[in-house]
């Protein structure tokens, strides 16, 4: 760290070279330079291009990449003492370059491994040949929590256990790539790889354009097509199952769902009916044929797997047994992540395929066997020792996995005794020294250890390998420091060809047929969240309007006891809004609720919409600590109002009129109807204080209109006419009902086709009742009742669509 | 022995429940060398909207039901006629526990009755240092002798107390309390055996209770019972022990299912949507059928 600081304050040298301070470690392979310090061929053009840009421009370029990631709202979650927090995505700006020919070798090795894995699962959950022949110890499998007995003997409906895999690779001192870990349960990070690519190419578009770098989009397109193909066979939809917004990589789940146009569901969106897996949508239960799960299998079904799971779907295992749904990957696939299994792979490959592994695992010894245990104990200093059944990557598992050479005598003696006693519980793995790759720090390149994550997806033609992936980069030279939870970074991976590469995008090609997604696929939970988002945003706006009107007057009179101000205070108080604080807690919590509702359905938001909402929330929390009542608060309210309008404008102008938008609109119209009716009831009541009617017009944003429409002073009748009964005023009660009537008419009808739903009937009745009312009918009591009736409409909508 | 068994499980909900899905494991199976089921039936009220019967991994009979409509009670009635005939325990041919480990390694199988499934810690019967230490005092020349001794000691050292524990109680907690019911004693024994490296499983079932001399049998006085099976080596195989009564399982023990612990064979599991609590009751009758009346 001290070294880095020195560099920053030093004068810029005349002939600045990025490589000036690049010093790889002895005995460690460096990706960029060879043993004599010269750039390898695949890096030469790239380094030259970076040199030509110079440090100043490079800094600007890399800032551009960071800006992209911030604008896109890319984050991951870190769990620490402060709880679960969103962190910005830590992009290391310099990509890791790999030559196409070398990549071909890696790909071949991983495809072989993927095929082998498929056979191993089929055997363990099927005929048990590997156990019978004594190649795999039965005790090891039986003890694994990832060996799921409820699916033993179940052939996957798709015909395959595995569809999406990731492998963690590292290059050892001998220059060979080794597999550090296998991700077979629900691999994460493919979406982040895509975001890394977008961000990196924002910074280095010209260099990227000139080098022949393989594109990533084709990988995702082929996988999506494969999933859709599988769903066609089983007759149902494709869905991604997420544990929910609190998950470490929820951002990625939402991102992939949005990028591929696939429904994003949580366990409670699903139910099992007649042996089929169904999603609860606003048009009733619809079958799901393919479930791409990002949820660990043990949590998938509280009825047959972990009973304490709150995020699963009761009956899912039964639906899978019936062959009615394909899980990607099959339940039980996580077994292959078991660390001890790596030690058996070479023999299994020989047994099942008559092949040697093209890409070996890092050397692993399971201490459940006598000779292996002795080997581990004899070579303790070169070993990483950890739990045999762990499915975590060794370098991410710092609590229970220890490097032999770093233990004190006491710790060592204790661990050795435990291994002697319970060998089957431990594995030893050769400590890996990872190769280094350049990172850009304060104007220079410096080497840092890196590992590489590569993705494979199954298509009808076989495995397809993502030509790229993401590299984890350590924050220091310590090769164990690459875990992102501990400050590591991620870099893009460029597979570079010496010939032009095919340019693929996700956009449909001309010859592709396409079908437009029909409305009615909207999960009920998403509809409910959208409705509440609409309500919270509207409620915030209405509150802010009242507060602004309050503070303007407070600034003029400085007398909070003035009858009108006292009136407003009493009006707002029951809603948790205390006017004595400039930014009342009730307002903050309403906006927080809006952010929460939106966070539950992030796949349905454009990054712009999400950022606008986050900005709004940031602003109001900031104001809460700085703003004073009166003039200051007036200005603050105006800022918040402008940001709220900005967000509403985004939703209104940019959001496609999917069913989801209609629920947002319904929420908004319901809330506005309620708020206006309530406020009218208060400010137009007989005996309301002086100035109440003018204030009402201001709150209803109708001062100008009133002046134009009525050549008289504001009176009770004109104010009610304009704000309750005028069908052309977007802030009138009648207008809200007209909008509600139109939107509910466009929603899918649940149940009896061609009949009006009870909710639609009630809206029509209320709409008609208001349309024929006269201003004189609108007493304070009638207006309060009206607010109650509009509130009741929400329950009817909820009953019909959110059930 | 021939028995007529009746089981009645009833659940009352504070608030109407809807969307309930359950798996019920109460129907005894025919088990070669142990028991034969002559007839059995299982019914539900209200009638479920979906019902499926299947065998789980361990071979237990499972009935899966879904009750869609709102209901405020669920009644489950099982009746079965079962003939139990267990072999007399012969000469003890089980090895010592050191040789047991070798014999275990030689079992290359993941079949449902393979001992490997029953050696690792499970949710209710983990491996616990205190229980292992307690079990070590039982180590005898043979595995079966070790198991029998542990069975007797638990019977002697622990107090039967229906109020001390719940169905969720784990072996380690019951061990600390020194009290519990058949489920707890079985979990403690399983945990102790696993700690010694002896594969051990949980058996759920019914026990015929013999009324005191001169007193009539009380209807519904019985309850579901639990005991332990232990793997005693290649030749001796699985043997069953009842730590609640300090005895080997006899012809008074009628088996419903096997598992690693209670959670594999709970009579009912399931999720339903209700806002209130639920209260369950069970009534069991195990009636010996006099042969001449058949």
Image (cartoon, coloured by chain):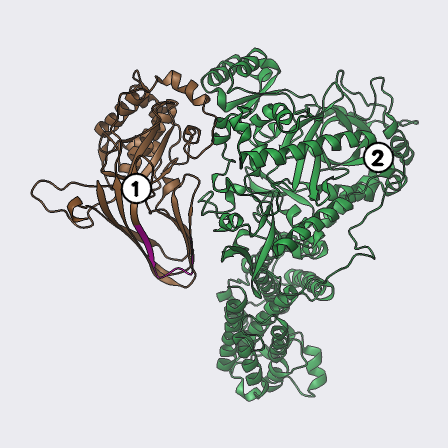
Q: Residue furthest left?
A: B214
Magenta span: B40-52
Which chain is home to disc 2? A
The circle on residue A496 is 2
Q: Are marks 2 and 1 on the same chain?
A: no
Residue B270 x, y percent position in the rendering: 41, 50
Residue A216 x, y percent position in the rendering: 77, 43
How far apart, in angstroms, are the residues tagged by discs 2 and 1? 70 Å
Residue A599 seen = no
The circle on residue A380 is none
Q: Residue furthest top?
A: A378
The total number of labels drawn is 2
- Seen at 65% across and 55% down, the residue is A232
Rendered green, the chain in question is: A
Judging depth in this view, the residue of A159 and A698 nearest the camera is A159
Q: Is residue A593 above or below residue B251?
A: below
Determine crowd level at label 1: few under 14, some 14-19, many 20+ residues with C-alpha closer than 10 A: some
Please indicate whether residue A740 sits to the left or right of residue A455 in the image: left
Mark in front: 2 vs 1 = 1
- Seen at 51% across and 84% down, the residue is A779
Identify residue for label 1.
Answer: B36
- Seen at 83% across and 26% down, the residue is A10
- Seen at 72% across and 28% down, the residue is A450
Residue A334 x, y percent position in the rendering: 57, 37
Residue A658 seen = yes
Name the secondary structure under disc 2: strand
Judging depth in this view, the residue of A413 and A345 nearest the camera is A345
Q: Which quadrant, please, contains the N terminus of chain B?
A: top left
Which corner quadrant of the image does residue B181 belong to? top left
Rendered brown, the chain in question is: B
């Amino acid at each position: 760290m001290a070294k880095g600081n020195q560099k920053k304050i030093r004068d810029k040298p005349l002939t600045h070279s990025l490589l000036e301070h690049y010093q790889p470690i002895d005995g460690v392979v460096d990706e960029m330079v060879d043993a004599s310090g010269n750039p390898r061929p695949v890096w030469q053009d790239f380094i030259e291009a970076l040199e030509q840009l110079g440090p100043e421009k490079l800094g600007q370029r890399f800032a551009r990449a960071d800006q992209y990631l911030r604008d896109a709202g890319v984050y991951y979650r870190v769990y620490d003492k402060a709880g679960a927090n969103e962190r910005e995505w830590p992009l290391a700006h310099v990509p890791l370059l790999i030559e196409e020919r070398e990549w071909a070798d890696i790909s071949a090795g991983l495809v072989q491994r993927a095929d082998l894995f498929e056979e191993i699962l089929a055997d363990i959950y099927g005929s048990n040949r590997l156990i019978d022949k004594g190649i795999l110890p039965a005790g090891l499998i039986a003890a694994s929590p990832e060996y799921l007995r409820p699916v033993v003997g179940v052939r996957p409906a798709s015909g395959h256990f595995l569809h999406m895999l990731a492998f963690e690779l590292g290059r050892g001192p001998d220059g060979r790539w080794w597999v550090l870990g296998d991700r077979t349960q629900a691999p994460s990070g493919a979406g982040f790889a895509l975001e890394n690519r977008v961000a990196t190419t924002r910074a280095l578009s010209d260099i990227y354009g000139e080098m022949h770098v393989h594109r990533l989009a084709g990988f995702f397109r082929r996988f999506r097509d494969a999933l859709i193909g599988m769903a066609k066979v089983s007759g149902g939809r494709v869905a991604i199952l997420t544990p929910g917004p609190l998950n470490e990589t929820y951002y990625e789940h939402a991102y992939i769902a949005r990028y591929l146009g696939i429904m994003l569901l949580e366990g409670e969106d699903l139910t099992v009916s007649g042996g089929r897996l169904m999603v609860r949508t606003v048009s009733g239960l619809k079958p799901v044929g393919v479930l791409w799960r990002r949820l660990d299998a043990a949590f998938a079904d509280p009825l047959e797997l972990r009973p304490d799971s709150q995020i699963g779907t009761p009956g899912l295992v039964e639906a899978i047994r019936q062959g009615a749904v394909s899980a990607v990957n099959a339940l039980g696939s996580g077994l292959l992540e078991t660390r001890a299994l790596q030690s058996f792979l070479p023999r299994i490959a020989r047994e099942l395929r008559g092949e040697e592994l093209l890409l070996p695992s890092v050397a692993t010894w399971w201490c459940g066997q006598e000779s292996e245990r002795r080997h581990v104990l004899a070579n303790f200093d070169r070993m990483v020792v950890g739990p045999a059944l762990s499915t975590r990557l060794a370098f991410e598992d710092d609590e229970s996995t220890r490097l032999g050479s770093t233990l004190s005598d006491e710790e060592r003696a204790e661990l050795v005794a435990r291994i002697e006693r319970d060998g089957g519980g431990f594995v030893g793995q050769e400590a890996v020294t990872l190769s280094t790759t350049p990172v850009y720090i304060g104007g220079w390149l410096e080497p840092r250890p890196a590992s590489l994550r590569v993705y494979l997806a199954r298509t009808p033609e076989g495995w397809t390998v993502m030509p790229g992936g993401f590299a984890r980069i350590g924050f220091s030279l310590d090769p164990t420091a690459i875990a992102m939870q501990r400050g590591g970074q991620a870099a893009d991976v460029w597979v570079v060809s010496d010939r032009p590469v095919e340019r693929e995008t996700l956009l449909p090609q001309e010859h592709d047929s396409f079908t437009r997604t029909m409305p009615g696929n909207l999960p009920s939970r998403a509809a409910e969240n959208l409705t509440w988002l609409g309500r919270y945003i509207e409620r915030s706006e209405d509150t802010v309007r009242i507060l602004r009107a309050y503070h303007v007057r407070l600034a003029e009179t400085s007398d909070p006891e003035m009858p009108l101000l006292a009136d407003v205070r009493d009006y707002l108080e029951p809603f948790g809004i205390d006017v004595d604080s400039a930014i009342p807690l009730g307002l903050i919590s309403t906006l927080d609720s809006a952010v929460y509702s939106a966070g539950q359905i992030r796949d349905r938001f454009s990054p712009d919409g999400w950022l606008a909402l986050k900005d709004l929330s940031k602003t109001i929390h900031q104001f809460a600590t700085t703003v004073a009542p009166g003039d200051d608060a007036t200005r603050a309210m105006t800022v918040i109002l402008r940001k709220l309008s900005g967000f509403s404008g985004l939703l209104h102008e940019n959001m496609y009129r999917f069913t989801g938008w209609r629920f947002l609109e319904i929420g908004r119209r319901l809330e506005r109807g309620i708020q206006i009716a309530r406020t009218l009831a208060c400010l137009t009541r007989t005996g309301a204080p002086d100035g109440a009617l003018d204030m009402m017009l201001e709150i209803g944003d109708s001062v100008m209109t009133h002046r134009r429409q009525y050549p008289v002073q504001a009176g009770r009748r004109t104010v009610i006419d304009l704000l309750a009964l005028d069908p052309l005023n977007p802030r009138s009660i009648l207008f809200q009902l007209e909008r509600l009537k139109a939107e509910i008419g466009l929603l899918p009808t649940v149940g009896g086709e061609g009949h009006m739903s009870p909710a639609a009937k009630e809206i029509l009745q209320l709409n008609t009742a208001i349309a024929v009312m006269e201003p004189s009918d609108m007493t304070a009591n009638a207006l309060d009742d009206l607010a109650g009736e509009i509130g009741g409409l929400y329950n009817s909508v909820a009953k019909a669509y959110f059930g | 022995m021939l028995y007529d068994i009746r089981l009645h499980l009833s659940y009352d909900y504070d608030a109407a429940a809807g969307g309930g899905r359950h798996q019920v494991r109460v129907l005894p199976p025919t088990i070669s060398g142990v028991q034969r089921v002559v007839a059995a039936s299982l019914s539900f009220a209200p009638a479920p909207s979906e019902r499926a019967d299947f065998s789980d991994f361990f071979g237990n009979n499972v009935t899966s039901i879904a009750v869609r409509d709102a209901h405020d009670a669920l009644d489950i009635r099982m009746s079965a006629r079962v003939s139990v005939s267990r072999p007399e325990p012969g000469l003890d041919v089980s090895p010592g526990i050191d040789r047991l480990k070798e014999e275990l390694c030689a079992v290359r199988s993941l079949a449902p009755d393979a001992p490997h499934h029953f050696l690792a810690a499970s949710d209710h019967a983990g491996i616990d240092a205190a229980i292992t230490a307690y079990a070590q005092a039982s180590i005898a020349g043979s595995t079966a002798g070790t198991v029998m001794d542990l069975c007797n000691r638990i019977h002697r050292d622990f107090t039967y107390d229906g109020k001390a524990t719940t169905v969720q109680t784990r072996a380690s907690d019951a061990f600390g309390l020194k009290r519990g019911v058949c489920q707890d004693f079985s979990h403690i024994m399983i945990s102790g055996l696993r700690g010694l490296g002896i594969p051990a499983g949980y058996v759920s079932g019914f026990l015929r209770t013999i009324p005191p001399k001169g007193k009539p049998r009380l209807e519904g006085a019985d309850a579901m019972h639990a005991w332990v099976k232990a793997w005693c080596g290649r030749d001796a195989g699985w043997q069953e022990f009842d730590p609640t009564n300090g005895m080997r399982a006899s012809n008074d023990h009628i088996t419903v299912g096997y598992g690693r612990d209670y959670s594999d064979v709970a009579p009912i599991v399931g999720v339903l949507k209700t806002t209130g609590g639920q209260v369950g009751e069970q009534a069991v009758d195990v009636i010996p059928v006099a042969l001449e009346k058949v």
